[in-house]
């Protein structure tokens, strides 16, 4: 068993990883089993650098707010702003506090310095501006309206900028944390919000109707941002509407809408060239995801499943597993789990050929590992066949805490 396991394990580098895939994927998705461990992001950073230098990758997309990500992209491409400010404003979920994310942004800016735009690296967030409750749709709606107002007949616009501002009202009312448990606190189905949904839909339809002229007139980046604003405005207002819903389908809708918006963002990024996407394993895995919320088990098609349905063989998913996270109470894994079998190998990190791993495991699959910390999701042995490869990191050392421990 040990010899067969060692035969399935390779050094974690781009060449070793790509050698396990049938072809260079247009979208290479690298998952992680938990957030908040910089060692996993350091592995991601190393792989991205090698993918850039050896495989021609130019885009990295993270599980972070797609609109905030524009701040990071502006910085890495043109040096707009300062690094401290970019890390504060350019990430959601607290990810800007990560030293590894900071190093990624710093390296991308240094790489791009002096290079023509066609050869520069690009940064993107592909999550919605949600943060559980959903943020105000003001940024997306106002930017989309302004783009169209500058280039279309004013008579075709569904509203004026002043009406838009009045309907949006105070931004804070859109992000009330109490709406997570109390739909009645949401503004998502107020008359103003319903009117905004119609406006967003009409603005998105007008953008589509004007595509030939706009694509000819706008730089590629401006056109892509207009599309991003349209997707985000319509998706965010739909999310707010379901935040206000009181039916049993509410939570399922919210999970599905987030996955759908993430998938749409990744698919558009993949139009521009090969992308490395990084997020939780549960988002990027093929098949359905599940969780327990409100005393119920909920299932929905994951972002990875939605992307895989469109890209097929051009999508590759590489899960990541961890041995220990001792500072979070995750000890040495039991020897009859996948993590335990890999933990027994010498060395600190591997990329694993899942086909050889499955052959080494034989007819008796390992048992699922139980996690004492809800923030860590162990590998499901039944899902191994859905991975194109597996990255294993033996131990996560304690560093500065940038993710809630609870």
Image: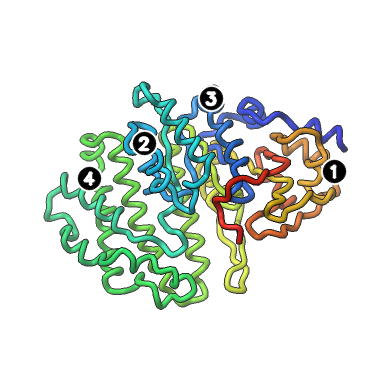
Q: CA distance from mark 1 to mark 2?
A: 50 Å
Q: CA distance from mark 4 to mark 3?
A: 36 Å
Q: Nearer the viewer, mark 4 or mark 3?
A: 3
Q: Secondary structure at mark 4?
A: loop
User: Which residue position holds label 2?
Assistant: 75
Residue located at (79% from left, 49% from top): 332
First in residue order: circle 2 vs circle 4 = 2
User: Which residue position holds label 3?
Assistant: 55
Q: Nearer the viewer, mark 3 or mark 2?
A: 2
Which quarter of the picture shows residue 195? bottom left
Query: Which colour style is shown?
Result: rainbow
How packed mark 2 is, by other alpha carbons closer than 10 Å (few <14, some 14-19, many 20 or more), is: many
How packed mark 3 is, by other alpha carbons closer than 10 Å (few <14, some 14-19, many 20 or more), is: some
Q: CA distance from mark 2 to mark 4?
A: 30 Å
In the image, 209 versus 401, the foreground residue is 401
User: Which residue position holds label 1?
Assistant: 362
User: Which residue position holds label 4?
Assistant: 210
Which residue occupies the extreme front position in the image? 400
Whether the residues at callouts 1 and 4 have beta carbons within 8 Å, the answer is no
Q: Is residue 148 left or right of residue 80?
A: left
Q: Secondary structure at mark 1?
A: loop
Residue 59 visible (yes or no): yes
**Quadrant (top left/top right/bottom left/bottom right) for the N terminus:** top right
Above or below, 57 relative to 339: above
Expressed as whole percent of the image width and height from the top left, the position of residue 391 reads 67, 38
Q: CA distance from mark 3 to mark 2?
A: 24 Å
Q: Secondary structure at mark 3?
A: helix
**Quadrant (top left/top right/bottom left/bottom right) for the C terminus:** bottom right
Whether the residues at callouts 3 and 2 have beta carbons within 8 Å, the answer is no
First in residue order: circle 1 vs circle 2 = 2
């Amino acid at each position: 068993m040990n010899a067969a396991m060692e035969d399935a394990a390779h050094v974690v580098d781009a060449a070793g990883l790509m050698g396990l895939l049938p072809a260079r994927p247009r979208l290479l998705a690298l998952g992680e089993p938990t957030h908040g461990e910089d060692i996993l992001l350091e592995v991601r950073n190393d792989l991205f650098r090698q993918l850039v230098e050896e495989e021609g990758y130019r885009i990295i997309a993270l599980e972070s707010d797609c609109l905030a990500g524009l701040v990071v992209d502006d910085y890495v491409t043109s040096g707009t702003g300062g690094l401290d400010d970019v890390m504060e404003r350019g990430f959601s979920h607290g990810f800007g506090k990560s030293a590894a994310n900071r190093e990624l942004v710093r390296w991308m800016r240094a790489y791009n310095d002096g290079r023509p735009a066609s050869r520069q690296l690009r940064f993107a967030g592909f999550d919605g501006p949600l943060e559980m409750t959903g943020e105000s749709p003001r940024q997306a709606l106002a930017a989309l309206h302004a783009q169209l107002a500058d280039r279309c007949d004013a008579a075709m616009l569904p509203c004026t900028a002043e009406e838009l501002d009045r309907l949006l009202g105070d931004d804070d009312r859109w992000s009330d944390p109490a709406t997570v448990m109390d739909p009645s606190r949401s503004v998502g189905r107020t008359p103003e919000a319903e009117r905004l949904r119609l406006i967003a839909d009409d603005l998105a339809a007008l953008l589509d109707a004007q595509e030939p002229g706009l694509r000819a007139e706008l730089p590629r980046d401006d056109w892509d941002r207009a599309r991003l604003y349209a997707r985000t405005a319509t998706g965010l207002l739909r999310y707010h509407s379901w935040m206000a819903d009181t039916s049993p389908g509410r939570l399922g809708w919210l999970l599905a809408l987030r996955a759908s918006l993430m998938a749409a963002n990744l698919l558009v990024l993949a139009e521009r060239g090969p992308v490395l996407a990084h997020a939780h394993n549960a988002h990027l895995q093929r098949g359905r995801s599940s969780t327990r919320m409100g005393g119920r088990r909920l299932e929905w098609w994951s972002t990875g499943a939605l992307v895989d349905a469109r890209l097929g063989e051009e999508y590759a998913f590489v899960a990541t597993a961890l041995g220990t996270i001792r500072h979070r109470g995750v000890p040495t894994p039991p020897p009859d789990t996948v993590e335990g079998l890999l933990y027994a190998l010498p060395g600190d990190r591997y990329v694993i050929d899942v086909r050889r791993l499955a052959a080494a495991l034989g007819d008796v699959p390992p048992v699922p590992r139980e996690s004492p910390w809800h923030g860590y999701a162990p590998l499901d042995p039944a899902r191994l066949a859905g991975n194109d490869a597996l990255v294993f990191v033996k131990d996560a050392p304690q560093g500065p805490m940038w993710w809630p421990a609870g």
